Amino acid sequence: MISYRTVAGKNRSMPEIPDSSYQNPAAGKPSEEAATDAPSPLEALQKTSEAVNERVTGLADSLTTWIDAQPWIPDGLVRPVHFVLLLLAVAFASWLLFKVARPLVLRVGKRIAEKSPTRADEFLFGHGVFRWLTHVLPALLIYTVTPGFFASVPWLARILKTGSLLYLLLAAYMVVDSLVNAITTDLQRTRLAQRMNLGALAQVIKLVTALVVFILAIALVIGKSPMVLLGGLSVFASVLMLVFKDVILGFVAGIQLSTNRLLSPGDWLEMPSHYADGDVMEIGLTTVKVRNWDKTITTIPTYALISEPFKNWRGMIESGGRRIKRSLTIDTNSIRLCDADMLARFHRIEHLADYLREREKEIAEWNEAHGIREDSPKINGRRLTNIGTFRAYVSAYLRTHPGIHQDMTLLVRQLAPEGRGLPIEIYCFSADRAWANYETIQADIFDHLYAVIPEFGLRVFQEPTGLDFRRLADSPDPADGEADSTTRPAPTERPDGSSDSAGPER
């Protein structure tokens, strides 16, 4: 506390000015123990701090003397005015240093960055690394001048020094945060970003830095060593694991995703359990952001990508083709053996001429080898069918289609019928992977196939609609004309003389 004495010529007390020769017990070593040649950097810094403290203490004493000499200041307000003026002086000096030094540092740094051949400096400026570095200057000023200004009030000096150190820690954390963001942005342009989960790694570094800063801040506030706090963390280990459960699981999952290359930003992810179907925007420490095709954003816990199944379409993108897998359902009542008229018509189809010549030659040789004559019933021996010829046509058509990838799998096959016609599945890959172009190629193929199916004497299976039932109710008696025996059964005579017709074909 400040000690007061009586000044001659005044009926008031003023603070006693400390002797300028006073030295802090913690300051410096005795001269006989000091290095005789060149002092170490720590000793030089300590001597500089002593000199600054002496100079600042002298300024504080001069201010005290001036305040005490003013007759208009009441005796009871000398100390409050003294403290307020000192605090205002420290605050103004810090603000002035920040306002003057900040533009200079940023301007010089920007000129250096413009002359640099790399773009790293631009990322440092863009993410505010140098801006946060300028916040260190006022904190250092407060930390340096506080012991000298408030030497007679140790508790206030301790509070201001602690506050300046906390401000330094905050500025240091923001510098590290900005630096990590700048490095991550710079590495996103390299191939390393495709092999590693840089976003999760950056968040881990930020989390560890924040934890270190938090421990140091608590140690400063309570005046204990950080090692004491670290030793006590074992007591709260279970609580920390519960609080940071998602962070720990997400960190482990991020490492597995990066190491095994299961998922990368930009991949097409499909995960129905989380209603995600779109491009991966970001793989974070705890969540993965997916932009769906309807432009909505879905967040998925990172550890869910390890514990739950998902589909990554990266293989399709890297393969150069996009799969087409769709079926045509053929009405089984329209399937039949080919007669001479059908074969003559099929020979005029461009994609079937070579196929028919080879198949007819093969069938004729087989029938001759097994004693099957041409005038024997069609059920004997081997015969061409309209459905088999149609499959051959579809395969030949796809082989010549410019939108189909010819170096990848191409199949035209039958699937098991399930009471709704005979499915003919087309399995191939488009040469264009773009969504709109892929859909156009697929639609053009099936537009053509639906249009040519009647040329093969086939019909597409379709569930009856209300219009079909209306036509059935309004259809005339089939006895008026000759019904097609291949598509409609003969009417059955009822006891009352009416007939029961099967109705029109679908």
Image (cartoon, rainbow, N blue to C red):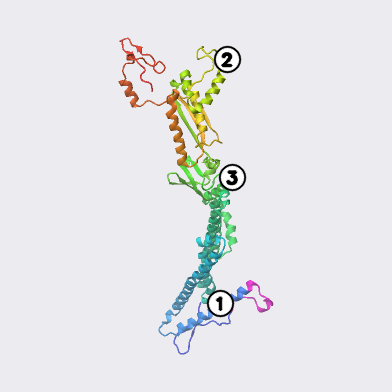
Can residue 59 be seen?
yes
State the image quarter where residue 306 is shown. Answer: top right
Tell me where residue 461 appears, x and y as whole percent: 42, 25
**Circle 2 Cα neighbour tier, 10 Å, few/some/many (<14 / 14–19 / ≥20):** few
Separation of residues labelled 3 and 1 (CA atoms): 59 Å
Magenta residues, start to end: 23-43
The amino acid beneath tag 1 is: Asn
Q: Which residue is mark 1?
A: 53
Q: Which residue is mark 2?
A: 368
The amino acid beneath tag 2 is: Glu
The amino acid beneath tag 3 is: Asn
Separation of residues labelled 2 and 3 (CA atoms): 60 Å
Asked whether residue 29 is drawn in magenta, I would say yes
Tell me where residue 68 appears, x and y as whole percent: 46, 83
Which of marks 2 and 1 precedes in the sequence? 1
Q: Which residue is mark 3?
A: 260
Secondary structure of the residue carrying numbered label 2: helix
Secondary structure of the residue carrying numbered label 1: helix
Residue found farthest to the right = 37
Secondary structure of the residue carrying numbered label 3: loop
Which of marks 3 and 2 precedes in the sequence? 3
Q: Which mark is residue 437?
A: none
Q: Nearer the viewer, residue 412 or 70?
A: 412
